[in-house]
Amino acid sequence: MTHSIRYFLLISFFLSLGACNSQKEVINIAVASNFEKILKVIIKKYEQTHHNTSINIISGASGVLTNQIVNHAPFDLFLSADTQKPLFIYNNNPSLRQPHVYAIGQLALWIPKSNKKGFCIKTLNEIKSLVIANPKTAPYGAVANKILANHNIKVEKTIFAANIAQSFLYTQNHYAEAGFVAYSMLKGNDEGCQQIFQHQELSQSMILLTDKAKGIYDFILSGEIQKLIEESGYNTANLERTVAK
């Protein structure tokens, strides 16, 4: 399917949703796939006190979502897995508010069938297949690629998933022996060998694209929700909120 056809279908989808929810204000949020699960929890809380609001979530790799926004997809808020892409959008439209960091993600190497604990990275050279998110479009994949290069690790077969959520599913379903996944997706799961990597490049920022989403934007930055985000596997303390130009 070509990009133009996908974009037309996306627009048609939004228009149909707006028609179905004519009595409510419809807000469309684009979100990096690593944060989709927690965003659904946040929105459920938000809608408890905002009954006249209907919020749609569209998740994917940050690079893909950025491309859609640049091509005028009807999003009201964008939560990226990095700071560069919202900053790119802002620099091309300085009338928008500056992007703000809402969380710092954590990358995890996961080897589900390994009984070794601790430094899983040391066992990767024994692994025949590894999945990572596409480094060209997914920030988590770009960081994973750097980790592999820094440790001089070469795996027989590397699978590139479309985004970090797909990387998690491929690893969970054993399409690959190991995978780099978002730590937030592993919370409560102690299976196999897990190693967490904290990396400043995984500071995640959001940009308000229309004033319709100002309420949910402020809600995400509130103390209550920041605590929830922290409990979900992200860092939120002492964040440098405003993203530098």
Image (cartoon, rainbow, N blue to C red):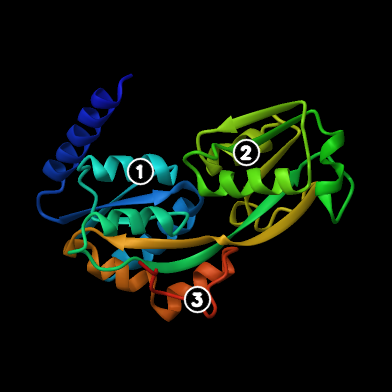
What is the CA distance from the residue labelled 2 to the residue labelled 1? 19 Å
Q: Dot 2: what SS?
A: strand
Q: Kindly identify the residue that appears in the image at 35 percent across and 66 percent down.
A: 245
> Residue 154's x, y, as percent?
77, 34
Q: Kindly identify the residue that appears in the image at 70 percent across and 49 percent down.
A: 147
Residue extending farthest top: 1
Task: Report which residue position mark 2 lands on.
Answer: 132
Against 145, residue 128 (above or below) is above
Q: Dot 3: what SS?
A: loop
Task: Report which residue position mark 1 lands on.
Answer: 65
Left/right of residue 208 with respect to residue 107 in the rendered view: left
Mark sitting earlier along the chain (2/3): 2
Three-letter code for the amino acid on which mark 3 is drawn = Leu
What is the CA distance from the residue labelled 1 to the residue labelled 3? 24 Å
> Residue 165's x, y, as percent?
54, 42
Q: Residues within 10 Å of mark 1 (few under 14, many from 20)?
A: many
What is the CA distance from the residue labelled 2 to the residue labelled 3? 27 Å
Against 78, residue 98 (above or below) is below
